[in-house]
Image (tube, grey):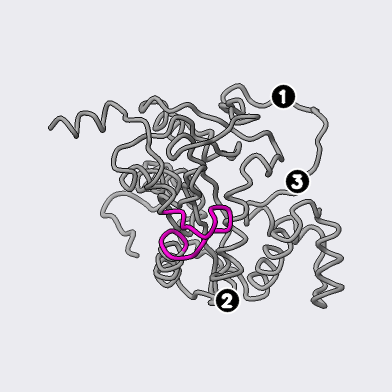
Amino acid sequence: MDYKHPSLSLRQQCELLSVSRSSLDYVPVPVSAEDLKIMRIMDEIYLRDPCIGVRRVVQLLGRDFALCVNRKRVRRLRRTMGIETIFCRPRTSIPDREHVKFPYLLRDKKITRANEVWCSDITYVPMERGNAFLCVVMDWHSRKVLGWAASNTMDVTLCLTALARALKAAGGVLPEIFNTDQGSQFTSQEWVAALQEKGIAISMDGKGRWMDNVFIERLWRSVKYEDIYLRGYATIDDLIAGLTRWFCDYNEWRPHDTFGGSTPAKIYARTPAIATPETELKTAT
C-alpha cells in the first residue's frame, strides 16, 4: 500500500488517524496447522466432557493423541475458541456494574407452545484452514432452529445477524422470553437494546450453568458430530453451504424422538402462538 503524501510524513499521518506506527505494516500470522489440529481435538473433548480443565486436557492430548502440549498453550487456544471449563466457583469478585446481567426466568417454568421462549448460543467451528464461529437462535418448545449465522469473528454482529434471521423466519411473531448465557456478546448494549426495544423479556443462565441452556448444547453435539467433523469444511462459504443443508434437514426432515418422530418444523407450526401488535397490524393491512 502506498502511504506517500506531499507534505505529511508517515508518522504524522499515523498520529492524525490515531494509528500505531509499529502496526501499520503488520501482517497477521495465520494459525498453524498444528494449532488447528489441537483445537479440533480440544473441541471434541469439550463436547464429551465440558467439566475437564486445562491440566486434564494436557494429559488427554498426550495420552490419547501423542501430542506434547503445555498448559499455557492449551489455555491460550481455549481462550481463542471461546470455551471455558464448567465448575462450581466461589464468589471471589463482583461483576462490573456496566456488564449487564439478567436473572434466569425459566426455572420451574413449563414451556408449552412455540415462541414462548427462544434461546441462543455461540460455538467454535473447526475448519480445514482456520476456524469460524456459529450462532444459532432456537425455539425452546419445538427445538426448531429459527435463525443462524457463521463468521470468522465472534462479536455481537454475528448474534444480531442470527436474531434478525430468526425474527424474519417467525413472520413478525416475537418470543415472550429470550434466554442466553452471560457471554459478552449477549450482555452488550447492542444485544440488550435489540431485545428490549421489542418488549422481549431477557433471561440469562447462571455462570457455568450449561444445563440452563441444554437444548442448544445438545444441538452443538449433533451438528458437529453429524456434519462439521465429518466434512472438514475448508472455507466459510463451504461451511455456510453445508450448514444450510444440515439445518434444513434438521428442521424439516429428520424425526425427533422427543416429539414421537415428528419434526421441529411441524411442532413449531402446529403450536399456536400469541399474536403481537406487529402481527395484528400485518393481519389488518
Q: Secondary structure at mark 1?
A: loop
Which amino acid type is shown beneath numbered disc 3?
A: Ile
Residue of label 1: 94
Distance from the alpha carbon under mark 3 to that under mark 2: 27 Å
Answer with mark 3 or mark 2, whichever residue precedes in sequence.
3
Count of marks placed on residues: 3
User: Would you identify the image quadrant in which residue 160 lies?
Assistant: top left
Decide: few, some or many residues near mark 3? Use Cα within 10 Å; few <14, some 14-19, many ≥20. Answer: some
Residue drawn at point x = 59 percent, y = 40 percent: 183
Q: Which mark is residue 86?
A: 3
Q: Residue at x 36, y 30 (%)?
A: 274
Percent x, y of residue 69: 80, 68
Q: Are there few (<14), some (14-19), or many (20+) residues within 10 Å of tag 2?
A: few
Give the mark toward the camera: 3 or 1. 3
Give the labeled residue for mark 2: 230
Say whether disc 3 or disc 1 marks the residue closer to the N-terminus. 3
**In the rendered structure, which disc, 2 or 1, sits on the residue that comes first in sequence?**
1
Q: The C terminus lies in which quarter of the figure?
A: top left
Residue drawn at (57%, 56%), measured in percent from left and top? 219
Secondary structure beneath dot 2 equals helix
Q: Nearer the viewer, mark 2 or mark 1?
A: 2
The verdict on residue 6 being magenta is no
